[in-house]
Amino acid sequence: MDPVPKKKKSVSSKQDKSQAGSVKSKKQLPPGEILEQQNSQHDLQIDEPQQHDPFIPPPIQTQIKVCIHHNLPFQFFCEACEDPICQQCTILGPHNTQLHRINRLSDSFKLRCAKIEESIKANLLGKREQLLAQIHRIEYRIEEIKYVKTIIERDARAEFGGVLERLKQSEGQKLAILSHEISELQRDLDKINEVGSQFYDLKEIPDPCPFLLKSRNIYDQIEYMVAKPFKVQIDVYPYDLPRELTELRLQLQRASAQQQLIEFKNEIIWKLLSEKQIDEEVIKQELERQASEEINEWSKLVDKFSLELKKQQLVCYYCGCKMEKQYVNSICAQNRQDQDNDKVFCNEQPPQNYHGTGRHYFADPIL
């Protein structure tokens, strides 16, 4: 809580005391002095500085804006000009024509607030959610990239750690062999130094007896050391250390060359398949063309032979029946004396004496 109430309490306590004193002395002081005392207390209350809580913002002091034309407060809003106006602007001008749509200032405020709020809820909030979702997706992709990078780095460290370990093992084996050979040579060298120092030490002794007693042994040691062979050739080479990185690079180069060869083979196979498909399409079209031509020829032959058959098939001039076994020796019901032969079925007309005989007369039909 802010310290203002404490100040007020102190002021109110002073007021209470002063009011109590004034109540006690009301009967003694005249009314003018009592009024002066109250005014002085009020001035003391106003002049005393008040302390505000830093966490509570100070009240906003609104400044009333007035019209620049008539120096009156704004009451209306012109929708056409997008300007706040006073009442005199709607009467005297410049917003007193029908071209200006005038609304109350509060109504325009409510309408525009509702419109903007609806636009925010309908469009802006959705766009905001989309942007937040996209940010979350990008952040998740960043975490994925970091995670995959960590896995690759771990695998690379493990693989190169194995490469270094195998290199150290190979180096240790070679160094162990060479150290053993050095130790053997060092023992022989120490033996030679020992024989030489023994010889010179005995030689410096004035008494020749110790030298003579050990001369044979010294001579035998010299003969043994001279006759003892030592390994001159060094069979351990540094160039056969494992070069796994170089081998990996060579394998990658060979793999790249093989990939190019595979792509070249794939291209050749694709060309062959394309040419084969083209050849098959050409052969198919040729077969279809020949088959259609053959079918057309057969259809023409069928039409020709059917026409020939129709030509060879005879019909009766009077009744139109075909020349078949059952009609050859039968009586024609249409060939009578009293029958008018308006409808005929043959191109060839029978003799005059054939009419009314009741017999069929077969000839070529009318096509």
Image: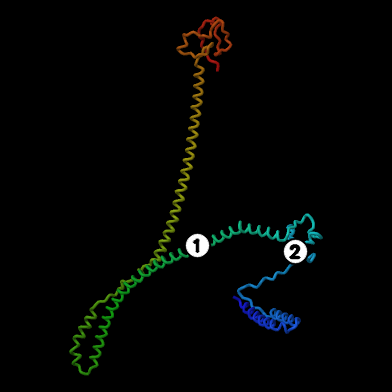
Nearer the observer, 147 or 47:
47
Which badge, 1 or 2, comes first in the chain's sequence? 2
Instruction: Say which element carries label 2.
Output: loop
Tell me how the rendering is colored: rainbow
Quadrant in which residue 219 is drawn: bottom left
Mark 1 and mark 2: span between their CA atoms? 53 Å
Label 1 sits on residue: 140
Instruction: Say which element carries label 1.
Output: helix
Label 2 sits on residue: 74
Q: Nearer the viewer, mark 1 or mark 2?
A: 2
Nearer the observer, 29 or 162:
29
Instruction: Check residue 57 in the rendering and tell me which mark sits there, or answer none.
Output: none
Tell me: residue 56, above or below residue 101: below
Nearer the observer, 236 or 45:
45
Q: For the point 45% across and 12% down, which residue is it?
A: 326
Quadrant in which residue 60 is drawn: bottom right
Residue 170 drawn at (x, y percent): 33, 70
Question: Disc 2 residue type?
Answer: Phe
Q: For the point 28% across and 78% down, which residue is it?
A: 183
Nearer the observer, 218 or 13:
13
